[in-house]
């Protein structure tokens, strides 16, 4: 579903744009994804809308078929990239799972501010961003994903999530579409 509208209280949730993840081989150039996120951050901040910057500092303990464990992150690995230009007004969330909502208090923080919609961006399209978007949808938020402000380490997974998963749980569009809907909401 294309981007139709932005609620008066929409938050931007930027997932895992941190040095250790942005430095991985990605399906789309990190510089492009970061530039689009910077555009969104600038506009959300200008409008006084909530901004949530998320990083991941570990994974859940559960087993999986791949046997993969989350690497022990260093401070530099978890550090948000400077392109985000984090401010003291941004809400910082450190997660230890894929979703920014799992055991972080994010839902309560958003509800205290009257947020009814979230725009989700970041890395990885099929993991942290998808899990966060799914949880937001399950919590009853209107969800929008700026599809040109996300990427993945796996291009096939990225394409699948955008084509098959997001349309079931969110409105999707480009950064330009989101910015246009924000302008229309004024």
Image (tube, rainbow, N blue to C red):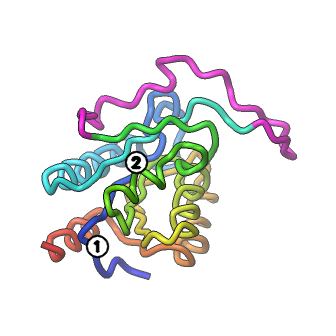
Residue 51's mark?
none
Residue drawn at (22%, 51%) of the image: 39
Helix, strand or loop for disc 1: loop
Q: In percent of the image, x 39 and y 62: which residue is there?
A: 118
Q: Is residue 175 left or right of residue 21?
A: left
Of 113 and 32, nearer the camera is: 113
Instruction: Please name the residue that numbered disc 2 is placed on.
Output: 14
Residue appearing at x 53%, y 43% in the figure: 104
Quickly name the residue at label 1.
7
In the displayed structure image, the side of residue 5 where residue 76 appears, left or right: right
In x, y percent, where is residue 166?
Answer: 53, 70
Q: Could you say whether the residue bearing mark 2 is in a helix, strand or loop?
A: strand
Magenta residues span 61-89
Front tag of 1 and 2: 1
Residue 54 location (% of width, % of height): 45, 41
Residue 141 on image: x %, y %: 45, 69
Q: Is residue 147 above or below residue 172?
A: above
Among the two numbered marks 1 and 2 on one chain, the one whose residue lies closer to the N terminus? 1
Residue 104 within the magenta-colored segment of the rendering:
no
Please tell me whether residue 77 belongs to the stretch shown in magenta. yes
Query: Which of the image's four quarters has the N terminus?
Result: bottom left
Task: Estimate the x, y position of residue 131 in percent, counting from the top left.
Answer: 59, 56
Q: Identify the residue at image location x=28%, y=34%.
A: 86
């Amino acid at each position: 579903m294309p981007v139709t509208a932005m609620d008066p209280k929409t938050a931007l949730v930027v997932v895992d744009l941190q040095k250790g993840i942005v430095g991985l081989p990605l399906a789309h150039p990190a510089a492009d994804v970061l530039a689009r996120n910077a555009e969104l951050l600038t506009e959300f901040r200008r409008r006084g809308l909530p901004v949530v910057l998320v990083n991941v500092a570990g994974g859940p303990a559960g087993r999986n078929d791949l046997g993969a464990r989350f690497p022990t992150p260093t401070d530099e690995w978890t550090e948000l990239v400077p392109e985000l230009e984090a401010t003291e007004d941004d809400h910082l969330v450190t997660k230890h799972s894929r979703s920014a909502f799992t055991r972080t208090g994010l839902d309560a923080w958003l509800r205290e501010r009257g947020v009814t919609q979230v725009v989700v961006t970041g890395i990885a399209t099929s993991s942290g961003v998808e899990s966060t978007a799914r949880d937001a949808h399950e919590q009853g938020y209107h969800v929008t994903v700026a599809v040109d402000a996300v990427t993945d380490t796996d291009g096939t997974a990225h394409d699948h999530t955008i084509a098959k998963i997001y349309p079931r749980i969110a409105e999707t569009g480009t950064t330009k579409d989101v910015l246009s809907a924000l302008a229309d909401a004024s």
